[in-house]
Amino acid sequence: MCKTFLPHLLARPEGHIATVSSMGGFVPVPGQTAYGASKAAVKLLTEGLNSELLDTNVRVTLIFPGAIGTNIVVNSGAMTKEQMSAASSGAAAYKTTPSPVAATQIIAGIEKNAYHVYIGSDSKLMGRLTRLMPRRAAKMIYSQMKSLLPG
């Protein structure tokens, strides 16, 4: 997509590329290793694009959503509807950001030419913790999400 659209963006007075990674791109989630690896690749691709485009009119923003109020967990097969319902009824650990709030925060980040945009308190917290104490962050996610592991 970038190779196709970048020439058009460069021809404009200004342009912006925004990509969506995930908390899984910077902290491992049990049962989601391949997904996390792909989101980590999105992170590095986006940061590389940012570096390559520094002297141009095109800006780049990388978005890290946490738990957003959608059906993505069930639709991805990471949890069944029953598991999601049980998790929602008990733990505050599954608090989600409503999708309209997430959209507003993403747009605000793009308008500010933010390098990274963390959506939700979970993403903000884990983003900081991962940079300061990566092993502790991984253990926290493991303890909250180990039910995603088979068996």
Image (cartoon, helix red, strand yellow):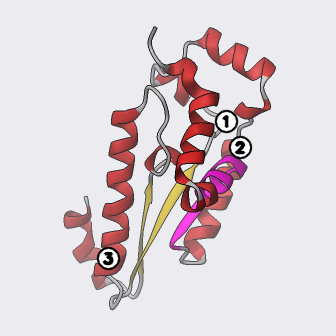
Callout 1 touching callout 2 (CB < 8 Å) = yes
* x then y, percent, for residue 28: 47, 40
* x then y, percent, for residue 45: 31, 62
Taking depth in this image into account, of 70 and 52 the one nearest to the observer is 52
Disc with the residue nearer the chain's start (1 vs 2): 1
Disc with the residue nearer the chain's start (3 vs 1): 3
In the picture, measured across the screen, residue 97 lies left or right of residue 49, that is right
Q: Label 1: few (<14), some or many (≥20) within 10 Å?
A: some
Residue that carries the numbered disc 1 in the rendered image: 69
Disc with the residue nearer the chain's start (2 vs 3): 3
Q: To which quarter of the image does residue 86 belong?
A: top right
| Disc 1 to disc 2, C-alpha distance | 6 Å
Residue 30 falls within the magenta-colored stretch:
no
Q: Label 2: few (<14), some or many (≥20) within 10 Å?
A: some
Give the residue type at disc 1: Gly
Residue displayed at 47% across by 19% down: 149
The circle drawn on residue 97 is 2
Circle 3 or circle 1, nearest the eye: 1
| Disc 2 to disc 3, C-alpha distance | 31 Å
Image vertical order of residue 136 relative to residue 79, above or below:
below
Q: To which quarter of the image does residue 110 belong?
A: bottom right
* x then y, percent, for residue 148: 52, 20
Give the residue type at disc 3: Leu
Residue that carries the numbered disc 3 in the rendered image: 9
Residue interval drawn in magenta: 115-127
| Disc 3 to disc 1, C-alpha distance | 32 Å
* x then y, percent, for residue 135: 53, 47
